[in-house]
Amino acid sequence: MALVDRAGARVRANYVKSVSKRPITKHRASNDPVLKVAVAVPLSREFDYLPPKDTPAPAPGCRVEVPFGSRRQVGVVLRLAGESTLAPGKLRRASAALDAEPILAADDLRLIQFTADYYHHPVGEVVAASLPALLRQGKPLHPQVEMIAVTAAGEAFDTAVIAGRAPKQAELLEHLQDAGGNGVDASLLTELLPHWRRAVKGLLLKGLASRFEARAEDFDETLASPAEAGPTLNADQAAALDTLRATDGFGVFLIEGVTGSGKTEVYLQRMQDVIASGKQVLVLAPEIGLTPQLVTRLRSRLGIVPAVLHSGLTDNERLAAWRAARSGAARLIVGTRSAIFTPLRSPGLIIVDEEHDHSFKQQEGLRYSARDLAIVRAKQLNIPVVLGSATPTLEVLQHCHAGNYTHLHLPQRAGGAAPPTIRLIDTTRNPATEGLTEPLAAAIGRHLEAGGQALIFLNRRGFAPTLICSSCGHVAECERCDSRMTVHAGSRQLRCHHCGATRPLPSTCSECGEPVRPLGEGTERLEEALRARFAAHRIMRVDSDSTQHKGAMVAALDSATQGDADILVGTQMLSKGHHFPKLTLVGIVNADQGLFGTDFRSAERMAQSVVQVAGRAGREDRAGEVLIQTAFPEHRFWSTLIDGGYARVAAEALAEREQTRWPPFTRLALLRAAAHRRDDALDLLDTARRLLAADAGEHLRVLGPVDAPMARKAGRYRAQLLLQSSDRSRLHDALARLRPALEQSPAARKARWSIDVDPIELF
Ligand SMILES: [Zn+2]
Ligand SMILES: [Zn+2]
């Protein structure tokens, strides 16, 4: 997606070549209506076409194939108009209508239009982001699939006759006989019998099997076992459920529940009502690939198979789930952020689980917040939306304080389990060796002895974050970024975590030739230290290095939740929604990274991260203990968090933001630019600053341009311009004028650029 920004100039040139300059006058175009089409190009406008020859005008929401420059593109008709801004002679016809009926309904188009307007992103790219890949490529909504079936002769055939000579044919024929006359999907056969294609030739020749095409099978949600009864709700859960049940119309509800408080159970019972009333429920979750437990639980408690939409699906699977949501065949849809755009036949409820999770914000291309769009969509559809978190974002909390959202509390762990105790370990008095202090190591031993499981959390993967020369102090740096290379001992490499560059791990300094040594700890080194100390125990590392293969993460976490590992070592990934029944100790190894962060969100993030990971400790009758290693035990953050919990950290941070005028008390937008030459990036931002001059002032502050905190990344210089306003509409009016002007600017051709509305990272 990032490449697209740069392609803007070329695409514009293409389109302009084909349609020449836009005249200001409007033209009536014969008797045909004009199709206003969204085409996936980085230009903030609709493109005008006439309907395909001898075809009735496709309705809004239908896809059309259109000539675009020298290429053909798939677009979606947004609306029909009586006239065009193009001269009649310049107006081209769409080359084909791809859908007999709209694949996107009026409500879907409304959300898409809002997204394009609010995030100041080209509508064609928003449409493209909202569609499954196959539809984006112009494939039919119901693709034809290859099927193989047994014939009448094949049905009656005794496979024993050929079993000796042609065992593969016999095996395939048995499968086909079992499947009956409707046949088997060829892709399924490939999974079952990898060499079936050779065997099928003989069967086809003998007239025992036939091959044909059929419409892709539809989703069947009834394949789950019957619904299981849930636990009895405690008083807090029951009260929250009563409040949720009081409305079917629009309302935003925050369920703030400590880990283990049973907020999922509250959603589940509300979902049951909605589904029983014939409506659909859309659940957004941070990373379904990482939280299979949620999907399993929904399935077993509701007794229906959810249509699941996440990045691990094949294109066909994704399309099938999308189609099931659109047709209403699926009543429960569970997906990651892009699922917010899934069409729903009869929507009744949206749930955003773990609303604080950063994965709801897309950080490249179309930079949107799925959580925020969930609220917009619920409002457009007049249905309720429920946000859940143990550590809600300050944005959401502030809406609760202002009375816009309903705040529901689940302060206790369901089943009455005690909250974990949190203690600090002062690393200035208890020095750490290879990341581990003696009190933490002793605690690990104690918990293992008592039959518990320990989780050691360090948000830094690799062996060591720095490779330093023992003699001259030279540090290994990335050649393409302003950053240090991370030492990876397992693969004997230096790797840049920002651009992915790698090089072999040297043993001597490139400057002076003296020996080098790794400095600091990553998860790999910590794992090694733990193995040395707890040799008799099973230790498992979970981070993106240890689980690069598809499914490896799920397998690792499955085995961790079964209790197969005694000690888990890992990054942030371990803090996301997993339930480790035997876990009694959580150790946080280097907690100080966030204490002195420069971002105004540092305290909020740090508290979220600590509370989320601490929440893993001690569930189901086992008391939990959390030990945090810090060199700054006197820091005010710790006493606030330990004495007052997340709520107090959040309250103090909100008060501070109000004073310093940061979000949620002001609105931000960030204009980023990146180019091979620093001047090109800065030129673009200077141009933007000039374009904004008329809007800038007391109500709209324009800050910069400045270099990004990491000024060079992957060989590109990066700079940014920050827009801040206490008035949302002023900010958006300014951006609405800025974007098209920038698209026309020559400076924009020399740099990649993007607008990030409500950014969550300020670099
Ligand atoms: Zn050196
Ligand atoms: Zn790099």
Image: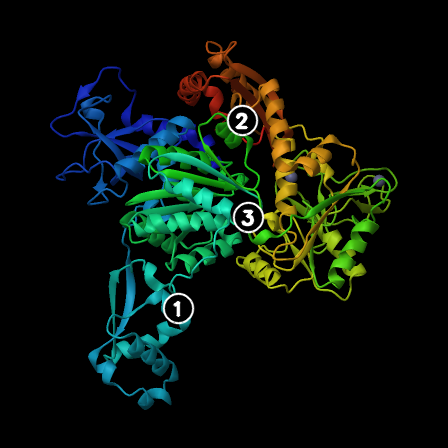
Disc on res. 500 = none
Task: Place residue 181 in its image quadrant.
Answer: bottom left
Q: Residue at x 85, y 39 (%)?
A: 428
> Does 490 sit above or below residue 763?
below
Residue 171 found in image quarter: bottom left
Q: Residue at x 57, y 42 (%)?
A: 411
Residue at 47% across, 23% down: 748
Mark sitting earlier along the chain (3/2)? 3
The residue that mark 3 highlights is 261
- Quadrant of image for the C terminus: top right
Q: In this view, does 223 lie above or below 655?
A: below
Q: Earlier in the sequence, mark 2 or mark 1?
A: 1
Q: Is residue 57 left or right of residue 635?
A: left
Element at badge 3? loop
Nearer to me, 195 or 430: 430
Quick one: 332 or 510, which is closer to the camera? 332
> What x and y, as percent, mark residue 209?
26, 76
Disc 2: which residue: 672
Residue sitting nearer the eye, 472 or 658: 658
| Disc 1 to disc 3, C-alpha distance | 45 Å
Q: List x then y, in percent, for residue 533.
A: 80, 59
- Disc 2 and disc 1: Cα gap in Å? 46 Å
Secondary structure beneath dot 2 equals strand
Mark 1 sits on what residue? 190
Q: In this view, does 708 lie to the left or right of 345?
A: right
User: How many numbered dots are placed on residues in this image?
Assistant: 3
Position in image of residue 316 (x %, y %): 36, 55
Crowdedness near tag 2: few (<14), some (14–19) or many (≥20) residues, C-alpha within 10 Å: many
Q: Kindly report which numbered mark, 1 or 3, lies closer to the viewer in this rendering.
A: 3
| Amino acid beneath label 3 | Ser
Question: Does 364 appear above or below 522?
Answer: above
| Dot 2 amino acid type | Arg
